[in-house]
Structures are given as structure tokens and as C-alpha cells.
């Protein structure tokens, strides 16, 4: 060629070509082999993981009555970007049976960033929510006419009975803490907020499924990805059977109407809670769906504190019902014998006067029947001062601690480790507690004499009182009170040890219980409970009246029946009601009758208790 | 007849084979890019793959016809063809519809053609005719005045009159042939240095934005800023490139498989069957497929250099280097853009991008060279 002078430039040009190719291949190697981030980005571009919500487990009572179930509700969703300009507003209004004015208002609300903070034209927005199947059926048929409109199905809790709101608890939207603590949840999910719904959340919620769909660049769904290869079906939640007897529960709620108080009924043999009522209460349906937060706030502000579960959280001195424990601990200690006689001077007794009139001296059975304060003061004193007074009383602290441990063994002073949430512990004060107040040598039996009759520094919950009745019914043991009947798989899933339902023995031997039971039987035949006994049911009981520094005394009753084969143990507390014999005893008596005979033969009594208004306004 | 036989025996079948491999693979990827998981036939005219198939057949026919036309025709009619082309470019905006701000498309019934795609061939012929004179040498800058003028005229018309920056910039590729013919190499070096300097200056904001505003269209300014990392804007101007990188990267080593690319199928990458067609290759055929395509292009262009070097007359050699420059420029700018290395400049990837004009334009360009090459054996030593 003529210009061979530049011949070598062919190599430069070839070099450029090879260099360009090399740069591209290196770049491709970086993008496609080294950089790992693109796969995730591509997936988040093109794949939509749609959650498939499982249906929440149902709740039944012990007789297989359905208590809590799921109700489908529907939300109308709208993607404004897709609805377009030729959206047939009138036809849409007709399909939903709403007025055009309402349509305009709802559209304005939806677009208003103050009312709808997550507003976007590109994502589905809620146009109307919580509609019934009937409300949406017409729109469903015509959905093809309305681009950008979709119907989202959700489920809400629904309740067969207006009962047991404290126990059942409620379901609500998860909060930030739930989201942080449990990766299972995502924003807008629902979970159990309290009660059984919260306690058994992991069993009830089931397992969410996922459907992997493809989405194009405009956000339109394009069907399932790889024929559903990555999909995971949802697993429904576990249905649970509760230990409650819903009819007994409802009877108790009826009897506590217009009162403040609580009732707990336990099957002594199993620890199963048959009824657990706190009054005042609310309709469980009030805390479902849209009105939930409004109603919840109203309950929070109510001065009668309906949200507090008095059966678990209220703490009272046990009053005379504690005399049974004094008797049992005295028998176990040996300072008290069935035949032990103590004198009683009636209202003239010191240091504690008697509120009843009976003969003197009195024996243990008679003392229980007559609820004799001086008897149990003397019995308490003899437990604590076994070695006498003054200088001889060197082991006073040990005696008190032994007494206290015996009392604690009935389930007092601690929370039961079971599926019953948010219990108060109650309190049986330790010797250190009194040391702090009076100094190590500054207190003796006489100092803490109020404890002998269940007043003073002792605090118990109604649940603990019911358990006390169960202990006496069983003759020295109890099984922790609980609310759900779980099979072994459910028990493991709920995180409970097998030993949960083992018998817990009190420190009082079973031989000592017979005489206490006899005393309790006499309470119902000749003592404070005699007006409310049903003789053929063989009821045992003990009334109590708790001094209330803030107002009228609280009425307390514990009991069980039948005496020789106890099926039900009950504790009832009616606040500010006065004598236990007058208000708490009939409530417990009616419940025992209902549970054992399946009917109430005393309708006037039922009506009188039901219609009494004892709530203070 | 003797002449025709020697033409047939002189045809460079290697180049034709590489051309066919690229064009067929390109067509398969156009089908892939347009596929929407609701399969229609590759030959259905309702989709772009079907249309591209027609264009491909037309291109093969065009190539065959070009091989039959005596190469001396171009040398004789060189300036006339160039003049006619300039007139057509001038007339285009008067006949054109505005397509995305561009006035470069002429619509004839069902067909849309872009005359600018053919202008490259005729400019190359005119330059080859001028520089192919037996007494022509590149000694001083003045010797390059006319060739530069021949380039700048269509460039200006396309850029200003038709508002097609990409197609206009392609004319810069003729610098490669000037270099081969003796233009000082420093200008290429300076060009690279200037480009790097511009990048650095812009990157470190050494010049005020108002200067950029004066020189560039707003969208061009943003594109350059995004490329230089001055602006992080994945949903805006950087969207195309960001999505392009995601699509290619997610293909990994072996690709997702033919028709399995989610990013391209679901339209995350804009212009995926035209300027961004290489994304589909990257996503569905992976590193293996896309590196193979780059290598085939490399061999194709190296083959063109070899052909250029074996020409026995200046006219053919100059023309051949024009072809080399144009293919190299298109490959570099297009793939560089898709790989996020260069600014977004809309020019097609030869034989791959959907569109009749570019396919026919490249076919014309290539087959004129193949005819010249086939006829070289008849030339005097």
C-alpha cells in the first residue's frame, strides 16, 4: 500500500478494539459474578410476596360450645393511578349502595394526607373498610368494570356470647415492640393483645403463607412466579378448648351485674377454672374492628376500672375465710387439736372481740361455724409462742416463718405459674417485714394479732381464695388453676412443662382437713351461710367480711360442694357490699347449685341478687 | 461471468457468518425482550420479533442486491449520493412526525424509516472518494478540511434540525479512519484526555452548573450528572441504567434462561428491545452469553480491520476503516451505556437492536464493504 508509513497503526486500532472488549467483559464479570446485590434488587423489583393469612384458632368452652370465631370482613381498596378518568362513579356508588356525596367525601378523606398518612396514587388505598359479605357482593360481580378497585378480605374476631371478656382477651393491631421482637409480624398484622388471645398467640395465630407473584414495572400483577414453586400455604391456627363452663360463667356475670367484685370457680380435682368473672366488664364485641380504640379508651377512663381483672389483680385481706388456714396450720403445728377449747367473751373479748354470740368455751368446729375471732387469735398466738412469753419466746421468729411457709403452701403470696396472665401475687408478710417496722425484738403475736382473723397486712386475690377452697376440698393439695385444656402437643407448643398439672401438696397433712370441712359444713347448716344452703348439695363454706378503710366492707365467701366428693370450689368477692353472708355467699351458692344440678331452683334469690345495685357512683 | 465467479469466490464468508450469528441471536433476544409470558409466535407480525424477522429477510435481500452492484458505482456516484442524502436529511423533519422529541422518522404506510441510519454509509463513500484520490496524503490539517466538512455537515443537520444527538455523535467515529490515514495520533490521545478531564472537572464541580445549562439540554445535563455520580436518582434519569444493571447482574453466570428474565419481561428496563437490548442478553444468557456476544463483536471488528488492511486501493481501504469505526463506536457507546460506564446516548447495538432502519443501514454499510473486498482480486497490483 501507498501509505505503509502508518501501517503499524492497524495494531493500535486492533488494540483499541480488544481493550474495549476486555473492559466490557471485566465489567460483566463484576456485575454478574462478583456483585451479589443485583439478585435481591431484581427480586424486589419483580416479585411480590403476598401474605396469605391463616384463620385464627377458635375457642370452645369445656362443653364444646363455640365461644370465639372468625368473621370475614371486606375492605374496598383503590389504586388511584389505575382508576383513570373514565371511572364510572355512579355505577360504583350503585354497586356499593352509597350516595355520590359519600363517595366524594370518602375520596377526599382518602387523598387527605392528614387523615391517611400512607397515601399514594400507586398503591392500594382503603376506600371503605369492614364491610360484610352482603355489602360487597354486588361490587364483586361488577369488579371488572372498575379498574384499580380491589376487595381485600380480612377476618375479625366474633363472639357467640356476651361473656368472659377479661379471660378471652382481644385481638388488635401489632405495635412497634411486637414488630421489633418477633419477625413473624409485619405492619398491620393482628395479634392477641391480652387474655387467652395473648397467652396462646403462638398457637392461635397459625402460620402465615406466602404467594409469590410477579409484578411489572407499573406495579400490575402478572400471575404466579415459576408456577407457584416458591409459594407456601398458610396453616390455620390451633383451636383451643377452655376449661370454662360458659353457662356458669354467664350466671356469675349475671349475678354480679351492677356490682364491683369477682367470682372464681375451680374444679378442685383438676385445677380447671370453671368460671372467672370480674365486674364490671364489657361486651367483647366492643373491642373488635373500627370502634376498638374508641371503646378501649372509654374503658380506660371508667372510674370503676372495668379493664382490671379483679379476680386476678384485686388484692384484699382474706377476712374470716383465713380462719380455715389458721385452723389447718395450727393442727399441723400441733398447738391446736380438734378438741382444743378456747374461751370467748363475745363482744367483751380482748384483744379481739367476737362478732357473734355463742357459748364459751368453744371447740374448733364450733369456732369455724361461729367464726369466733377470739378462738383464732388464741390459736394463732399459740402457734407463734409455743415456748411461752418473754424470755422463753426465743424461737418466735422461727415459729412465725414456719407458720408463713405453711400458709404460702396453699398458693398464697405468689402468682400461679400457668396460663392465667397478669395475676397479682398477694402478700403474706415475712418476719423481715415486721422487723423493719417494729425492730427485731419489737413485735410479738399480740403485735400482729389482726393476721389471726385475716385482716391487717395479709393480701390475697380472689383466685387464691378459690384455690384455698380447692385445697380444703381436696384435703391438702391443689393443681395450679388454669384456663385451657391442652393436649401434650399444644402444651409443648405453649412452652409448658409436663409438671404443670402435677399436684402441689400443702404443708398440712390430709388427716387435718376432715374437721375443717365439717366446720365448713356447719357454716352452711347452722352458721353464717345457713340461709343460702341447699341441703341435698352438701355445701361447705366460710363467709368473710373484710374491713375496708375506703368505704363499706367487702363481702367474701369461699366454699365447695358436695362435701365428700367436691366438684366445684368457689370464691366470691363483692366490693363495698357489707357482710359476706349477705352477698358473696348467695352468689357462690347459686353457682354451686347451677353447676351441680344444671338448674336453679331458687329463682327469687337469683333475681334478688341480680337486681341489687351495689356499685357506687 | 468470469468477473461474477471471481466475486463469489472473493466474498468473505467468515464476516457473513459472524453477521448472521449476531443478527439471529439479536432477533432471538428481541423476541425474548418482547415476550410477556403470554406466548405469541416468533413470526407473528403483531409483535416486534415478527416484524424484525421481516426486516431480517429484507436485510438479507438488500445484502444480496448490494453484492450484485458493481463497487465502482459508489466511487463514481460518491458525491451525488452524498448530496442526495444531505437533501433527504434536510427534508426529513418536514415530512416527519415528532417521535419522543425526535424529528428523524419518515413514515411510509406501515413502515417508519430513519434516513440518518443510512447517512453513515453515504458519508463514508464520499470521504473514501475524496481521500482515495491517488495523490491524496494527510500531511497537514488542511488536508483534512474537506473530510471534516463532509462529517460535520450531516452531523449538524441531524443534531440540530432532527434533534437526534445519538445518531449525530456517530459521525465522530470517522476520526478513527483519519487516524489510520495519517492524522496525528495525538488528537485521539487528546480526545481521551479531554474526556477524562471533563469527567473529573464535572465530578468535583469545578465548573458552575450555569455553564452546563448553557451548553446542554436539561435531560442531557441530568444524564451526565447521574453518570458522574453527581446525582443519585435511581427513579429518575438514572432509572434506565440502574434497572439495566439490575437486569444484567441478576443474570449471574449462566443466565436465567431463554424467556425467563423477569426484569426485561416485566418491563423494568425501558427501551429493552432497542437501545437496551443487551440487558436481555445479560439477564437471560448470563455472563457466558453476554461475554460471548462481546467476543463475537470483537472478532467481527478485528475481521473488518483485516479486510480493511488487505484492500489494494485507497478508496476501499478508507471506506473499510469508516465501517470499522462506525461498528466500534456503536458497540462501545451502546454497551458502555448499558453497563453504566458511559452516559445514556440513544444509539442502537448493530444487528441486535429492534428497528428496520438501523438493521438495513448496517447491512448496507457492511455489504458494500464485502462487495469491494470480493472484487479486490480483480484489481491490479
Image: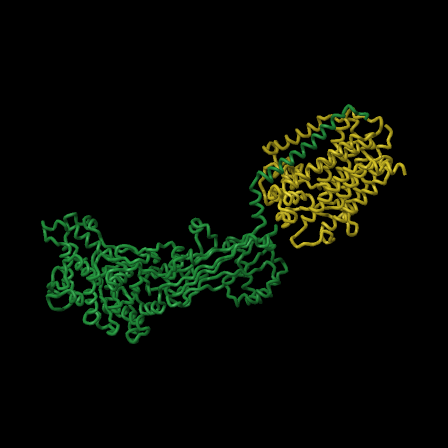
Chain colours: A green, B yellow
x and y percentages locating residue B75 in the rendered image:
85, 34
Instruction: Kindly tell me whether residue A291 is visible in this rendering.
Output: no
- Is residue B11 shown left or right of residue A242? right
- Is residue A282 shown left or right of residue A114? left
Displayed quadrant of residue A87: bottom right
Front residue (pair A522, A477): A477
- Can you say which quadrant of the picture contains the N terminus of chain B? top right
Front residue (pair B340, B36): B36
x and y percentages locating residue B301 in the rendered image:
73, 35
Front residue (pair B178, A270): A270
Extreme right residue here? B1
Tell me if residue A237 comes above or below residue B156 in the rendering. below
- Is residue B50 shown left or right of residue B375? left
x and y percentages locating residue A83 in the rendered image:
60, 58
Displayed quadrant of residue B317: top right
Tell me if residue A504 comes above or below residue B281 in the rendering. below
Q: Residue at x 57, y 47 (%)?
A: A43
Instruction: Kindly tell me whether residue B310 is visible in this rendering.
Output: yes
x and y percentages locating residue B163 in the rendered image:
72, 42
Q: Residue at x 21, y 69 (%)?
A: A521
Amino acid at each position: 500500500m501507498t501509505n505503509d508509513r502508518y501501517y503499524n497503526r492497524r495494531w493500535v486500532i486492533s488494540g483499541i478494539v480488544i481493550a474495549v472488549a476486555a473492559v466490557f467483559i471485566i465489567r460483566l464479570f463484576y456485575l454478574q459474578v462478583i456483585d451479589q446485590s443485583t439478585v435481591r434488587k431484581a427480586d424486589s423489583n419483580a416479585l411480590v410476596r403476598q401474605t396469605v393469612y391463616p384463620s385464627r384458632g377458635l375457642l370452645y368452652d369445656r362443653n364444646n360450645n363455640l365461644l370465639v370465631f372468625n368473621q370475614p370482613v371486606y375492605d374496598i381498596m383503590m389504586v388511584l393511578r389505575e382508576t383513570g378518568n373514565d371511572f364510572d362513579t355512579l355505577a360504583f356508588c350503585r354497586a356499593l349502595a352509597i350516595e355520590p356525596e359519600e363517595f366524594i367525601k370518602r375520596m377526599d378523606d382518602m387523598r387527605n394526607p392528614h387523615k391517611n398518612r400512607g397515601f399514594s396514587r400507586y398503591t392500594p388505598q382503603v376506600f371503605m373498610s369492614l364491610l360484610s359479605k352482603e355489602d360487597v357482593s354486588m361490587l364483586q360481580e361488577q369488579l371488572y368494570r372498575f379498574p384499580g378497585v380491589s376487595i381485600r378480605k380480612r377476618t375479625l374476631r366474633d363472639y357467640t356470647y356476651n361473656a368472659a371478656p377479661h379471660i378471652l382477651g382481644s385481638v388488635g393491631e401489632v405495635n412497634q415492640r411486637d414488630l421489633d421482637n418477633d419477625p413473624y409480624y409485619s405492619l398491620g398484622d393482628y395479634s392477641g393483645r391480652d387474655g387467652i388471645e395473648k397467652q396462646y398467640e403462638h398457637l392461635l395465630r397459625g402460620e402465615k403463607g406466602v404467594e409469590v407473584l410477579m409484578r411489572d414495572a407499573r406495579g400490575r400483577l402478572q400471575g404466579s412466579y415459576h408456577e407457584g414453586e416458591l409459594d407456601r400455604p398458610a396453616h390455620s391456627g390451633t383451636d383451643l378448648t377452655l376449661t370454662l363452663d360458659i353457662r356458669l360463667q354467664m350466671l356469675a356475670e349475671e349475678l354480679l351485674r351492677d356490682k364491683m367484685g369477682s367470682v372464681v370457680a375451680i374444679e378442685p380435682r383438676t385445677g380447671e377454672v370453671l368460671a372467672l368473672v370480674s365486674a364490671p366488664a364489657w361486651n367483647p364485641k366492643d373491642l373488635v374492628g373500627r370502634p376498638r380504640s374508641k371503646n378501649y379508651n372509654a374503658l380506660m377512663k371508667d372510674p370503676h376500672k372495668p379493664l382490671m381483672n379483679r379476680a386476678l389483680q384485686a388484692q384484699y385481706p382474706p377476712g374470716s375465710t383465713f380462719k380455715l388456714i389458721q385452723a389447718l396450720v395450727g393442727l399441723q403445728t400441733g398447738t391446736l387439736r380438734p378438741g382444743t377449747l378456747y374461751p370467748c367473751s363475745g363482744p367483751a373479748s380482748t384483744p379481739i372481740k367476737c362478732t357473734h354470740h355463742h357459748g364459751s368455751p368453744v371447740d374448733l368446729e364450733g369456732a369455724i361455724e361461729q367464726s369466733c375471732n377470739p378462738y383464732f387469735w388464741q390459736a394463732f398466738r399459740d402457734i407463734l409462742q409455743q415456748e411461752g412469753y418473754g424470755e422463753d419466746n426465743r424461737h418466735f421468729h422461727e415459729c412465725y416463718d414456719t407458720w408463713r411457709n405453711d400458709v404460702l403452701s396453699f398458693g398464697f403470696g405468689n402468682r400461679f405459674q400457668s396460663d392465667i396472665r397478669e395475676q397479682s401475687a398477694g402478700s403474706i408478710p415475712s418476719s423481715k417485714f415486721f422487723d423493719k417496722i417494729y425492730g427485731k425484738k419489737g413485735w410479738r403475736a399480740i403485735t400482729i394479732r389482726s393476721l389471726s382473723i385475716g385482716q391487717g397486712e395479709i393480701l390475697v386475690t380472689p383466685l387464691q381464695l378459690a384455690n384455698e377452697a380447692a385445697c380444703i376440698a381436696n384435703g391438702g393439695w391443689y393443681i395450679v388453676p388454669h384456663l385451657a385444656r391442652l393436649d401434650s402437643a399444644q402444651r409443648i407448643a405453649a412452652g409448658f412443662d409436663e409438671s404443670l398439672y402435677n399436684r402441689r401438696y400443702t404443708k398440712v397433712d390430709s388427716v387435718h382437713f376432715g374437721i375443717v370441712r365439717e366446720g365448713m359444713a356447719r357454716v352452711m347448716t347452722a352458721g353464717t351461710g345457713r340461709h343460702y344452703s341447699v341441703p341435698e348439695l352438701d355445701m361447705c363454706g366460710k363467709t368473710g367480711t373484710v374491713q375496708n378503710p375506703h368505704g363499706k366492707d367487702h363481702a367474701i365467701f369461699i366454699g365447695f360442694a358436695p362435701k365428700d366428693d367436691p366438684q366445684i370450689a368457689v370464691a366470691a368477692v363483692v366490693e363495698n357490699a357489707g357482710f359476706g353472708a349477705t352477698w358473696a355467699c348467695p352468689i357462690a351458692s347459686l353457682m354451686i347449685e347451677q353447676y351441680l344440678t344444671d338448674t336453679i331452683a331458687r329463682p327469687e334469690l337469683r333475681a334478688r341478687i341480680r337486681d341489687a345495685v351495689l356499685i357506687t357512683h | 461471468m468470469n468477473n461474477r465467479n471471481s466475486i463469489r469466490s472473493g466474498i468473505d464468508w467468515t464476516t457473513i457468518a459472524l453477521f448472521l450469528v449476531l443478527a439471529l441471536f439479536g432477533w432471538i433476544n428481541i423476541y425474548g425482550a418482547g415476550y410477556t409470558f403470554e406466548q405469541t409466535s416468533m413470526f407473528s407480525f403483531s409483535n416486534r420479533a415478527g416484524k424484525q424477522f421481516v426486516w431480517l429477510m429484507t436485510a438479507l435481500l438488500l445484502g444480496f442486491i448490494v453484492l450484485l452492484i458493481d463497487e465502482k458505482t459508489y466511487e463514481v456516484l460518491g458525491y451525488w449520493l452524498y448530496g442526495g442524502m444531505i437533501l433527504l436529511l434536510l427534508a426529513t423533519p418536514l415530512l416527519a412526525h415528532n417521535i419522543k422529541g425526535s424529528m428523524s422518522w419518515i413514515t411510509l404506510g406501515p413502515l417508519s424509516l430513519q434516513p440518518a441510519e443510512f447517512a453513515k454509509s453515504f458519508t463514508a463513500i464520499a470521504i473514501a472518494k475524496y481521500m482515495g484520490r491517488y495523490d491524496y496524503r494527510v500531511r497537514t490539517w488542511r488536508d483534512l478540511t474537506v473530510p471534516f466538512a463532509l462529517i460535520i455537515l450531516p452531523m449538524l443537520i441531524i443534531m440540530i434540525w432532527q434533534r437526534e444527538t445519538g445518531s449525530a455523535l456517530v459521525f465522530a467515529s470517522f476520526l478513527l479512519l483519519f487516524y489510520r490515514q495519517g492524522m496525528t495520533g495525538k488528537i485521539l490521545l487528546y480526545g481521551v484526555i479531554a474526556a477524562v478531564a471533563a469527567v473529573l472537572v464535572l465530578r468535583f464541580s469545578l465548573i458552575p452548573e450555569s455553564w452546563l445549562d448553557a451548553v446542554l439540554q436539561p435531560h442531557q445535563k441530568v444524564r451526565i450528572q447521574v453518570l458522574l455520580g453527581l446525582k443519585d436518582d435511581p427513579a429518575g434519569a438514572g432509572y434506565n441504567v440502574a434497572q439495566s444493571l439490575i437486569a444484567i447482574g441478576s443474570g449471574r453466570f449462566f443466565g436465567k434462561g431463554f424467556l425467563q428474565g423477569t426484569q426485561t419481561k416485566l418491563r423494568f428496563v425501558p427501551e429493552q428491545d432497542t437501545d437496551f437490548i443487551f440487558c436481555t442478553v445479560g439477564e437471560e444468557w448470563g455472563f457466558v452469553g453476554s461475554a460471548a456476544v462481546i467476543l463475537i463483536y470483537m472478532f467481527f471488528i478485528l475481521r473488518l480491520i483485516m479486510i480493511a488492511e488487505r484492500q489494494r486501493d485507497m478508496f476501499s481501504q478508507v471506506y473499510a476503516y469508516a465501517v470499522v469505526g462506525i461498528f466500534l463506536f456503536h458497540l462501545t457507546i451502546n454497551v458502555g451505556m448499558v453497563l453504566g460506564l458511559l452516559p445514556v446516548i440513544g444509539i442502537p447495538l448493530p444487528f441486535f437492536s429492534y428497528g428496520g432502519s438501523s438493521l438495513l443501514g448496517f447491512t448496507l454499510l457492511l455489504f458494500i464493504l464485502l462487495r469491494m473486498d470480493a472484487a479486490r482480486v480483480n484489481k491490479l497490483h
